Amino acid sequence: MWNIVEAAGWPIWPLLVASIITLAIIGERFWSLRVDLVAPKTLLPEVRELLKKGGATKEVCEKLEQHSPLGEIFASALMNMNASREVTKESIEETGRAVAHQLERYLTTLGTIATVSPLLGLLGTVIGMVELFGAFTSTGHDVAQFARGISVALYNTAMGIVVAVPSMIFYRHFRAKVNSLVVEMELEALKLVELIHGERK
Protein backbone atom coordinates (compact mmCIF):
# COMPACT_ATOMS: atom_id res chain seq x y z
CA MET A 1 0.00 0.00 0.00
CA TRP A 2 2.77 2.43 0.93
CA ASN A 3 4.45 1.71 -2.41
CA ILE A 4 1.28 2.83 -4.21
CA VAL A 5 1.15 6.03 -2.14
CA GLU A 6 4.79 6.76 -2.97
CA ALA A 7 4.22 6.05 -6.66
CA ALA A 8 1.15 8.29 -6.74
CA GLY A 9 2.94 11.26 -5.19
CA TRP A 10 1.60 14.03 -2.99
CA PRO A 11 -1.67 14.58 -4.95
CA ILE A 12 -3.05 11.33 -3.54
CA TRP A 13 -2.99 12.58 0.07
CA PRO A 14 -6.19 14.67 -0.18
CA LEU A 15 -7.91 11.62 -1.68
CA LEU A 16 -6.71 9.42 1.19
CA VAL A 17 -8.06 11.94 3.71
CA ALA A 18 -11.35 12.06 1.77
CA SER A 19 -11.57 8.25 1.82
CA ILE A 20 -11.09 8.16 5.61
CA ILE A 21 -13.80 10.81 6.12
CA THR A 22 -16.11 8.86 3.78
CA LEU A 23 -15.66 5.62 5.72
CA ALA A 24 -16.28 7.42 9.01
CA ILE A 25 -19.49 9.05 7.74
CA ILE A 26 -20.79 5.79 6.23
CA GLY A 27 -20.21 3.92 9.48
CA GLU A 28 -21.77 6.68 11.61
CA ARG A 29 -24.85 7.02 9.36
CA PHE A 30 -25.42 3.25 9.24
CA TRP A 31 -25.45 3.27 13.04
CA SER A 32 -27.52 6.44 13.51
CA LEU A 33 -30.19 5.80 10.86
CA ARG A 34 -31.41 2.47 12.23
CA VAL A 35 -35.20 2.28 12.31
CA ASP A 36 -35.30 1.08 15.93
CA LEU A 37 -33.19 4.08 16.93
CA VAL A 38 -34.99 6.77 14.90
CA ALA A 39 -38.64 5.63 14.73
CA PRO A 40 -39.22 2.64 17.02
CA LYS A 41 -42.48 0.82 16.31
CA THR A 42 -43.20 0.34 20.03
CA LEU A 43 -43.30 4.04 20.84
CA LEU A 44 -46.86 4.82 19.68
CA PRO A 45 -48.42 1.96 21.71
CA GLU A 46 -46.48 3.18 24.76
CA VAL A 47 -47.77 6.74 24.29
CA ARG A 48 -51.32 5.38 23.77
CA GLU A 49 -51.09 3.67 27.17
CA LEU A 50 -49.88 6.91 28.75
CA LEU A 51 -52.85 8.79 27.34
CA LYS A 52 -55.25 6.13 28.69
CA LYS A 53 -53.72 6.54 32.14
CA GLY A 54 -54.43 10.25 32.25
CA GLY A 55 -52.26 12.14 29.84
CA ALA A 56 -48.65 13.17 29.61
CA THR A 57 -46.82 15.16 32.26
CA LYS A 58 -43.89 17.50 31.65
CA GLU A 59 -41.50 14.80 32.85
CA VAL A 60 -42.93 12.30 30.36
CA CYS A 61 -42.52 14.79 27.51
CA GLU A 62 -38.92 15.44 28.50
CA LYS A 63 -38.22 11.70 28.49
CA LEU A 64 -39.83 11.37 25.07
CA GLU A 65 -37.63 14.18 23.71
CA GLN A 66 -34.53 12.25 24.81
CA HIS A 67 -35.86 8.90 23.63
CA SER A 68 -35.55 9.20 19.84
CA PRO A 69 -36.26 11.59 16.94
CA LEU A 70 -39.82 10.19 16.77
CA GLY A 71 -40.12 10.72 20.52
CA GLU A 72 -39.12 14.35 20.00
CA ILE A 73 -42.00 14.77 17.52
CA PHE A 74 -44.43 13.01 19.87
CA ALA A 75 -43.33 15.27 22.75
CA SER A 76 -44.12 18.39 20.73
CA ALA A 77 -47.59 16.97 19.97
CA LEU A 78 -48.27 16.12 23.62
CA MET A 79 -47.16 19.59 24.76
CA ASN A 80 -49.86 21.02 22.49
CA MET A 81 -52.49 18.34 23.07
CA ASN A 82 -54.97 20.80 24.59
CA ALA A 83 -54.75 23.08 21.56
CA SER A 84 -56.69 22.67 18.34
CA ARG A 85 -55.86 19.97 15.82
CA GLU A 86 -54.31 22.58 13.50
CA VAL A 87 -51.98 23.92 16.21
CA THR A 88 -50.94 20.38 17.16
CA LYS A 89 -50.15 19.55 13.53
CA GLU A 90 -48.16 22.78 13.11
CA SER A 91 -46.02 21.96 16.15
CA ILE A 92 -45.39 18.47 14.75
CA GLU A 93 -44.39 19.90 11.36
CA GLU A 94 -41.97 22.39 12.92
CA THR A 95 -40.33 19.71 15.05
CA GLY A 96 -40.35 17.32 12.09
CA ARG A 97 -38.33 19.77 9.99
CA ALA A 98 -35.73 20.07 12.75
CA VAL A 99 -35.57 16.28 13.13
CA ALA A 100 -35.22 15.78 9.36
CA HIS A 101 -32.30 18.24 9.38
CA GLN A 102 -30.62 16.22 12.14
CA LEU A 103 -31.07 12.98 10.17
CA GLU A 104 -29.36 14.57 7.14
CA ARG A 105 -26.26 15.38 9.18
CA TYR A 106 -22.97 14.75 7.32
CA LEU A 107 -24.76 13.85 4.07
CA THR A 108 -23.75 17.15 2.47
CA THR A 109 -20.12 16.32 3.25
CA LEU A 110 -20.53 12.87 1.72
CA GLY A 111 -22.10 14.33 -1.42
CA THR A 112 -19.32 16.93 -1.68
CA ILE A 113 -16.66 14.22 -1.47
CA ALA A 114 -18.45 12.24 -4.20
CA THR A 115 -18.39 15.32 -6.44
CA VAL A 116 -14.89 16.59 -5.67
CA SER A 117 -12.96 13.29 -5.61
CA PRO A 118 -12.86 12.84 -9.43
CA LEU A 119 -11.62 16.44 -9.71
CA LEU A 120 -8.85 15.73 -7.19
CA GLY A 121 -7.99 12.63 -9.23
CA LEU A 122 -7.91 14.79 -12.36
CA LEU A 123 -5.59 17.25 -10.61
CA GLY A 124 -3.22 14.36 -9.87
CA THR A 125 -3.50 13.28 -13.50
CA VAL A 126 -2.52 16.75 -14.72
CA ILE A 127 0.43 16.89 -12.33
CA GLY A 128 1.53 13.46 -13.54
CA MET A 129 1.31 14.62 -17.16
CA VAL A 130 3.41 17.68 -16.32
CA GLU A 131 6.08 15.41 -14.84
CA LEU A 132 5.78 13.12 -17.84
CA PHE A 133 6.40 15.89 -20.36
CA GLY A 134 9.14 17.30 -18.13
CA ALA A 135 11.07 14.09 -18.76
CA PHE A 136 11.68 15.13 -22.39
CA THR A 137 14.62 17.43 -22.98
CA SER A 138 16.66 18.50 -25.99
CA THR A 139 19.30 15.93 -25.09
CA GLY A 140 16.89 12.99 -24.69
CA HIS A 141 14.51 11.89 -21.96
CA ASP A 142 14.68 10.76 -18.35
CA VAL A 143 13.11 7.30 -18.23
CA ALA A 144 12.66 7.37 -14.43
CA GLN A 145 10.85 10.72 -14.49
CA PHE A 146 8.75 9.55 -17.44
CA ALA A 147 7.66 6.43 -15.55
CA ARG A 148 6.94 8.44 -12.40
CA GLY A 149 4.74 10.85 -14.37
CA ILE A 150 2.70 7.95 -15.71
CA SER A 151 2.31 6.37 -12.27
CA VAL A 152 1.23 9.68 -10.68
CA ALA A 153 -1.35 10.23 -13.43
CA LEU A 154 -2.84 6.74 -13.37
CA TYR A 155 -2.87 6.15 -9.60
CA ASN A 156 -4.57 9.49 -8.89
CA THR A 157 -7.17 8.95 -11.61
CA ALA A 158 -7.97 5.51 -10.22
CA MET A 159 -8.05 6.73 -6.60
CA GLY A 160 -10.39 9.58 -7.48
CA ILE A 161 -12.87 7.13 -8.99
CA VAL A 162 -12.46 4.62 -6.15
CA VAL A 163 -13.36 7.30 -3.58
CA ALA A 164 -16.14 8.94 -5.63
CA VAL A 165 -18.17 5.86 -6.58
CA PRO A 166 -18.93 4.48 -3.07
CA SER A 167 -19.38 8.03 -1.75
CA MET A 168 -22.10 8.71 -4.33
CA ILE A 169 -23.73 5.29 -3.82
CA PHE A 170 -24.00 5.73 -0.04
CA TYR A 171 -24.98 9.41 -0.34
CA ARG A 172 -28.00 8.42 -2.43
CA HIS A 173 -28.73 5.43 -0.17
CA PHE A 174 -28.76 7.54 2.99
CA ARG A 175 -30.83 10.30 1.37
CA ALA A 176 -33.44 7.70 0.42
CA LYS A 177 -33.24 6.23 3.94
CA VAL A 178 -33.81 9.65 5.53
CA ASN A 179 -36.80 10.33 3.25
CA SER A 180 -38.28 6.94 4.17
CA LEU A 181 -37.81 7.58 7.90
CA VAL A 182 -39.36 11.04 7.64
CA VAL A 183 -42.45 9.62 5.91
CA GLU A 184 -42.71 6.90 8.56
CA MET A 185 -42.50 9.45 11.37
CA GLU A 186 -45.11 11.65 9.69
CA LEU A 187 -47.55 8.72 9.55
CA GLU A 188 -46.92 7.85 13.20
CA ALA A 189 -47.37 11.49 14.19
CA LEU A 190 -50.69 11.70 12.36
CA LYS A 191 -51.88 8.61 14.24
CA LEU A 192 -50.93 10.35 17.50
CA VAL A 193 -52.87 13.50 16.51
CA GLU A 194 -55.93 11.33 15.87
CA LEU A 195 -55.47 9.69 19.28
CA ILE A 196 -55.14 13.04 21.04
CA HIS A 197 -58.26 14.46 19.43
CA GLY A 198 -60.32 11.33 19.91
CA GLU A 199 -60.50 10.26 16.27
CA ARG A 200 -58.71 6.97 16.82
CA LYS A 201 -58.88 4.40 19.60
Image: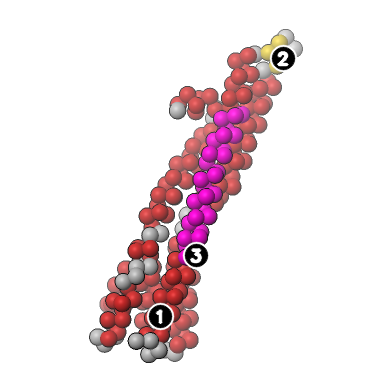
The residue sitting at 40% across, 49% down in the picture is: 27
Q: Is residue 11 above or below residue 136?
A: below
Q: Which residue is mark 1?
A: 191
Q: Is residue 74 left or right of residue 137?
A: left
Residue 154: where, in percent of width, then height? 60, 29
Neighbour tally class for label 1: few under 14, some 14-19, many 20 plus, Cα within 10 Å: some
Q: Which residue is mark 2?
A: 137
Q: Earlier in the sequence, mark 1 or mark 2?
A: 2
- For badge 1, the amino acid type reads Lys
- For badge 2, the amino acid type reads Thr
7 is within the stretch colored magenta: no
Pick the residue in front: 142 or 200: 200
Assign a secondary structure to mark 3. Answer: helix
Q: Earlier in the sequence, mark 2 or mark 3?
A: 2
Residue 4: where, in percent of width, then height? 50, 26
* Residue range (magenta): 153-180
Neighbour tally class for label 2: few under 14, some 14-19, many 20 plus, Cα within 10 Å: few
Q: Is residue 101 above or below residue 2?
A: below
- For badge 3, the amino acid type reads Asn
Counting the numbered discs, the total is: 3
For residue 113, say whether it is visible.
no
Q: Earlier in the sequence, mark 1 or mark 3?
A: 3
